[in-house]
Image (cartoon, rainbow, N blue to C red):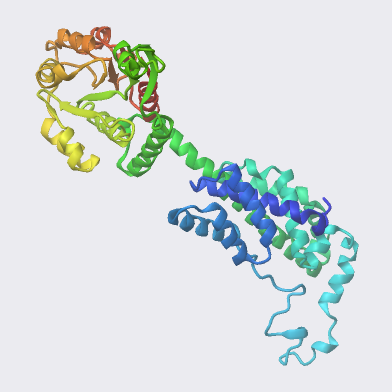
Amino acid sequence: MAVDSPNTARAATSSDQLLAFVQYLRGKKIPVSPADTLDAIEVAELVGYRDRSLLKNGLAAALAKSRHELTVFEAAFDDYFQPAPERPPAGGQTDGQPDGSSTDAPDQATQTDPATQNEDLLEGLRGNALFDALDSQDESALSVAIETAAAEAKVEEISLFTQRGQYVRKILDALGDEALREAAIEFEQSEPAAFEAVQALREQLRERVRDRVERAYLIHASAATEDLLDESLSKLKLGNVDHSQMARLKRLMDRMARKLAARHGRRRRRYRRGKLHVGETVRRAIPTDGIPFHPRWRKIERKRPQIMAICDVSGSVAAYAKFLLMFLYALQDVLPRTRSFAFSAALGEVSDLFAKLPVEEAIERVNLKYGGATDYGRALQDFSELALAEVNSATTVIVLGDARNNQADPRLDLLAEIKARARQLIWLNPESTRLWGTGDSEMLLVKRHCHLAKECNNLNQLERIIDKLLSDKR
């Protein structure tokens, strides 16, 4: 493949690199909008790419919007726009031996210069654009050629660490390395010095291409890997989450909560015009001798739901209760009226713990206080005595439990009364629906007394249910 002129291709290459860098930032969880991207392109056009420090400061002003984002941006910029390594000049000269002379070899002037011999042997490669760019160390031409070949090889599709060698080979083929490879094979047996010279140039090229592929993996695959890990974790049963995954799970939960808050948080008080408010209209008409110039209407206020969460914290479902409560309390901006109750046998309200303590600590205390053998009948009886009178048409009751009651009476009559009073009664069961009604499970009977009964054992399912709850306008 011929190497394009750097003057004609450099601008396009720089723009492609900048767009790839924006994608890299997104992989680092820095939100960059299309408008931000256009600002970054304009900044790059103004300051240029020669002054690395000036470019870094300009892009930071356009893309980093907080101290945290600035810290991440600076590290990402240094990783992505790594300075080109210094390469030895053609001919292998070093600072210690200028002009190829040495005081230790007085008879060297009488010897034939190997470089001259190599020049004669390599004359056949002259005119090959790739060889000429490598031999003259033309950094601009090589950079443009590698970017063009990378685009042709679709290096942005790399997704696995083990694919690096495959993409290195594709880019080398697109660059035209085959001609250099054939020359090396021809010189290998007959002309060792020429073979070494060609191999040195090929190794320089391979090193550059490896760097380009690894940068592509860093940009594309690492971001895709993070997304894949998040997606896998969001589908993993919460009861199977390992302690080492807790930090990632909490970040994922916070991100879901922010998304729901952004979607539903703007819905403050919304009114729908109802019937004519006769009394208010007449009062407003007194100054106009009873003529109703300003009719008043009865307003139907759409309020946020009041949530009462009743969580089984016995050993079989304690982990699921923990995450439900964490998720609900992460949504306090849109669910400020949340009351929490915990039970295994006896039930008690634990809202005050969540008001005073961090969510994780409050959950630990709840598990210690209310853990034990399960008795849904007693728990529903305690709830009826504590809070049933406060359940009304604005209340959504969420019960989290597996409905396994150790053959005791589940008091379905109390569940039916809660359903009759509440706006919604939602039962979330972490067990698969295939297990409902097996053994001591009362779930098939329980679901008849609920507005909604769903399997819920991972974050995706929990997010969908809470989203539906917040969207419900009944």
Residue for point 29% across, 13% down: 279
| Percent of width and height locating residue 171 | 72, 49
Which residue is more in the foreground, 377 or 226? 377
Which residue is more in the foreground, 318 or 97? 318
Give the side of residue 46 with respect to residue 325, left or right. right
Q: How many marks?
A: 0
Residue for point 25% across, 33% down: 322
Give the side of residue 199 with respect to residue 443, left or right. right
Residue for point 82% across, 50% down: 1
Give the side of residue 216 with respect to residue 458, left or right. right
Quarter of the rendering occupied by the C terminus? top left
| Percent of width and height locating residue 107 | 80, 91
The quarter holding residue 399 reads: top left
| Percent of width and height locating residue 200 | 73, 65
Give the side of residue 234 with respect to residue 422, left or right. right
**Residue 57: in sight, yes or no?**
yes
Taking the view exactly as shown, the residue that stands out farthest to the front is 289
| Percent of width and height locating residue 54 | 61, 65
Which residue is more in the foreground, 7 or 87? 7
Which residue is more in the foreground, 392 or 13? 392
**Residue 314: in sight, yes or no?**
no
Residue for point 14% across, 17% down: 389
